[in-house]
Image (cartoon, rainbow, N blue to C red):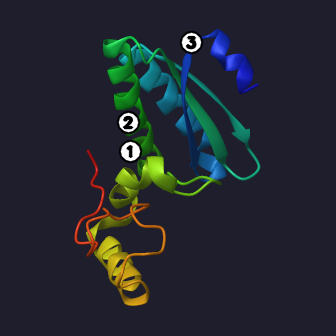
Amino acid sequence: LSQALYRIKPTKINEDIVVPRSKIPDMIRELEHIAKHSGVKIVSFGHAGEGNLHVNVMTDKNDYDEYSRAKDAVDKIFKATLKLKGSITGEHGIGITKSRYLEMETGDTALEMMRRIKNQFDPNNILNPGKIFLDNGDNAGVFRTP
């Protein structure tokens, strides 16, 4: 299915979210609303038994306006997910591409605690530098929600 989506548009922004199973219909309605108002196609499939949804925002990265609307749709998808008491991490975790959204889900306090734990165990920032926290030597910064 994933490869077939490229017949819709040449660029796919593939996201992985999870919501409580009872909220799947609400999330689908949110996705429909976001697609309609952003003017981009959104295709979703997943594992209904666990609430995991693979959300694909279909776009063309060479069309600046459309690609901007697609990236904005991703922000809205994550906000809707959290509103429904879900998680933006789905089954694949935060990773590099979602690290800028981590604060959106955890908040400042948890993020600061993560930074402190990382600094305690990795004061020289040699373990996965730049993966979650900005790679500036002391991990003083973190990718922030846009």
Please tell me whether mark 3 or mark 2 is closer to you in this view.
3
Task: Identify the disc placed on residue 76.
Answer: 2
Q: Position of residue 119 (x, y in %)?
A: 35, 83
Real-space Cα separation, disc 3 to disc 2, in angstroms: 20 Å
Is residue 25 placed above or below 40 in the rendered structure?
Answer: below
In contact (CB < 8 Å): disc 1 and disc 3? no
Of the 4 image quadrants, the one containing the N terminus is top right
Q: Amino acid at mark 3?
A: Lys
Of the 4 image quadrants, the one containing the C terminus is top left
Q: Position of residue 5 (x, y in %)?
A: 67, 18
Residue depicted at 38% across the width and 11% down the height: 63
Is residue 47 placed above or below 115 in the rendered structure?
Answer: above
Crowd around label 2: few <14 · some 14–19 · many ≥20 (10 Å): some
Real-space Cα separation, disc 1 to disc 3, in angstroms: 24 Å
Residue depicted at 47% across the width and 32% down the height: 30
Q: Which is more toward the observer, 126 or 65?
A: 126
Query: Mark 3 — residue?
Result: 9
Q: Secondary structure at mark 3?
A: loop
Is residue 44 placed above or below 127 in the rendered structure?
Answer: above
* Quadrant of residue 16 within the rendered picture: top right
Q: Position of residue 4 (x, y in %)?
A: 73, 18
In contact (CB < 8 Å): disc 2 and disc 1? yes
Q: Which is more toward the observer, 44 or 122?
A: 122
Residue depicted at 28% across the width and 72% down the height: 139
Crowd around label 1: few <14 · some 14–19 · many ≥20 (10 Å): some
